Image (cartoon, rainbow, N blue to C red):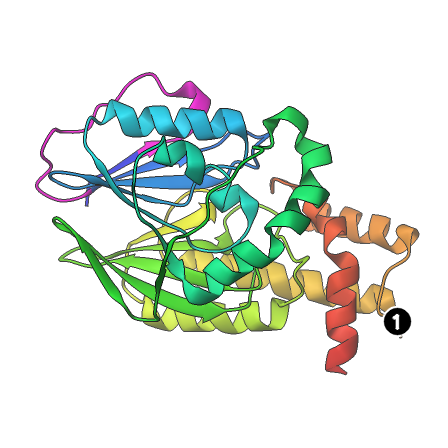
């Protein structure tokens, strides 16, 4: 599979894709640092496009829309991996007033509906005018293992349950050369968002993904560069280290003090000096401490 890696939305200068690719072309569009460098994927078939996930901020969402328009093929569908706003906030800009179906598993669609207002309350003060006032939700729910075909592009939905978010999934592009879009099951090179409190389930999901995607060379994460199955080991190592550090600091408590959080941040930054999104280290500390306390 030929892969075009577009590293920054705002750096895009024009489309170079073939008009009628013999095999799907995957365009990785990575948002700005302000937009948490979230990855969006445009899968280009012979006659149309499918997009997996979208962007967080208004600016990055509009830039993603420009990528889609530059390919000069109809957008046939949008697939959403999970219910965090950096992956669905930009769906409305992708739709651009057109009737394009937005697919997610039933669990992911429910999480988006149930938590969108709370996410806006939490994050709009942080992102200010870059937070979209209106957002579009999935309007087509799919079952686990359900297959969807759009022209020459066929995807299979795989429900994963709670892990990085309250309900995760991944989308498999089937064909001679398989690919998988795994959302934030891996945040390749980024500190993990652990604030939803399902790190034990997340670790189990990584084991499952290693089995199910063994031999798949083209795996596309929600953050960081695409690659192969080795990224599952990276994420597992990170989560094990994070959980161990939180557990050592919390003692018998279900939360960390501010001083303990500062220690945690220093420890994780030292262990992963090049990882991005450092604010996530302290953000999930109390949630993971409570998760570990319940497990005892």
Residue 16 magenta-drawn?
yes
For image coordinates 59% across by 58% down, the residue present is 114
Whether the magenta-drawn stretch holds residue 200 is answered as: no
Which residue matches tag 1?
A: 251
In-image side of 128 versus 70 (left or right): right
Identify whether 4 is placed above or below 279. Answer: above
Q: Quadrant of the C terminus?
A: bottom right
Question: Disc count in the image?
Answer: 1
29 and 217: which is toward the camera: 29
Asked whether residue 130 is in view, the answer is yes
Give the magenta-colored segment's residue range.
5-24
Tell me the quarter of the picture where residue 288 sits.
Answer: bottom right
Residue 107: image location, x then y, percent: 47, 66
Judged from the image, the secondary structure of the residue bearing numbered disc 1 is loop
Q: Quadrant of residue 172?
A: bottom left
Q: Residue furthest bottom?
A: 296
Q: Residue at x 57, y 45 (%)?
A: 190
């Amino acid at each position: 599979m030929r892969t075009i890696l577009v590293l920054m939305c705002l750096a895009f200068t024009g489309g170079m894709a073939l008009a009628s690719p013999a095999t799907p072309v995957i365009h990785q569009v990575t948002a700005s640092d302000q937009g948490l460098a979230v990855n969006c994927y445009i899968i280009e078939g012979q006659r149309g496009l499918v997009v997996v996930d979208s962007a967080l901020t208004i600016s990055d969402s509009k830039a993603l829309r420009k990528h889609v328009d530059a390919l000069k093929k109809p957008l046939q569908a949008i697939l959403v991996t999970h219910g965090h706003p950096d992956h669905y906030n930009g769906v409305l800009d992708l739709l651009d007033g057109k009737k394009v179906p937005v697919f997610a598993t039933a669990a992911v669609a429910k999480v988006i509906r149930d938590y969108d207002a709370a996410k806006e309350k939490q994050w709009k003060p942080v992102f200010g005018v870059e937070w979209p006032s209106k957002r579009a939700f999935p309007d087509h729910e799919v079952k686990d293992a359900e297959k969807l075909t759009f022209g020459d592009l066929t995807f299979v939905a795989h429900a994963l349950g709670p892990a990085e978010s309250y309900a995760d999934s991944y989308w498999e592009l089937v064909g001679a050369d398989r690919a998988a879009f795994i959302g934030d099951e891996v945040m390749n090179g980024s500190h993990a968002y652990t604030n939803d409190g399902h790190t034990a389930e997340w670790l189990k999901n990584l084991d499952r993904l290693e089995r199910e995607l063994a031999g798949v060379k083209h795996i596309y994460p929600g953050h960081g560069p695409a690659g192969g199955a080795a990224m599952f080991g990276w994420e597992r190592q990170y989560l094990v280290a994070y959980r161990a550090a939180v557990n050592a600091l919390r003692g018998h408590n279900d939360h960390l003090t501010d001083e303990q959080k500062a220690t945690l941040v220093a420890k994780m930054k030292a262990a992963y000096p090049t990882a991005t999104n450092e604010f996530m280290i302290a953000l999930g500390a109390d949630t993971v401490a409570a998760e570990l306390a319940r497990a005892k």
